[in-house]
Image (spheres, grey):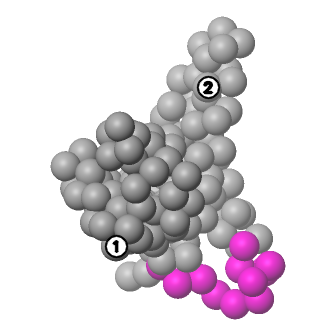
Amino acid sequence: MSLKDRIEEDYKRVFKEGNANVVSCLRSLKAAIKNAEISAQHDYSDEEVVQVIGTELKKTKESLEAFKKAGRTEQVMILASQCDVLQVYLPEQLSDEELTKAVQDAITQTGASTPADMGKVMGVVMGAVKGRADGNVVKARVQELLNTQSA
């Protein structure tokens, strides 16, 4: 079963159960996937769907942070549960050790030695982890390792 089919089946099941928050989240996700497919003018593969889910999760987390700063606890709880729903459809995230190894391999592969080489390293790492690590976490780890190398 493709990832899109799994999302559709889960949507139908949750709709029947009456869980409005999850239904809303999955409806938005389905719409985002459909819009991306229309823009690309082809049906998305599971890998492309994972990218859309990652984008939606990032948007939801950004909204979550904004509502936290505004003190909107009810909205924060809703968005936190939506993050949990979206996370279910993403591949298992890399552990800290696996991410560090991927970054070190990318640094070796690109010959990077200073923080100025961050763009080269990020390109290689993000291609290697493909949705299994948050971009901000990867960025922080790349900065950390490049700063220790150049020191």
Place of residue 62 in the rendered image (x, y in percent of width and height, measured from the top left)? 64, 35
Q: How many labels does the image show?
A: 2
Name which residue type carries label 1: Gln
For the magenta stretch, what is the residue range?
A: 36-46
Relative height, residue 126 to residue 34 (above, below): above
Q: Is residue 132 magenta?
A: no
Which residue corresponds to the image point at 40% horizontal and 56% vertical from the top-left? 113
Residue that lies at the very extreme toward the left in this rendered image: 97
Name the residue carrying label 2. 65
Name which of mark 2 and mark 1 comes first in the sequence: 2
Place of residue 72 in the rendered image (x, y in percent of width and height, measured from the top left)? 67, 13
Q: In the shown orientation, is residue 139 left or right of residue 30? A: left
Relative height, residue 59 to residue 117 (above, below): above
The answer to whether residue 100 is visible is: yes
Q: Quadrant of the N terminus?
A: bottom left
Question: In this rendering, which labeled residue sits more in front, label 2 or label 1?
Answer: 1
Please state which of residues 114 and 107 is positioned toward the viewer in this rendering: 114
Which residue corresponds to the image point at 34% horizontal and 73% vertical from the top-left? 109
Which quadrant holds residue 34?
Answer: bottom right
Point out which mark residue 109 bears.
1
Place of residue 103 in the rendered image (x, y in percent of width and height, measured from the top left)? 33, 58
Q: Is mark 1 on a helix, strand or loop?
A: helix
Q: Pointer 2: residues within 10 angstroms few (<14), some, or many (20+)?
A: some
Q: Pointer 1: residues within 10 angstroms few (<14), some, or many (20+)?
A: few
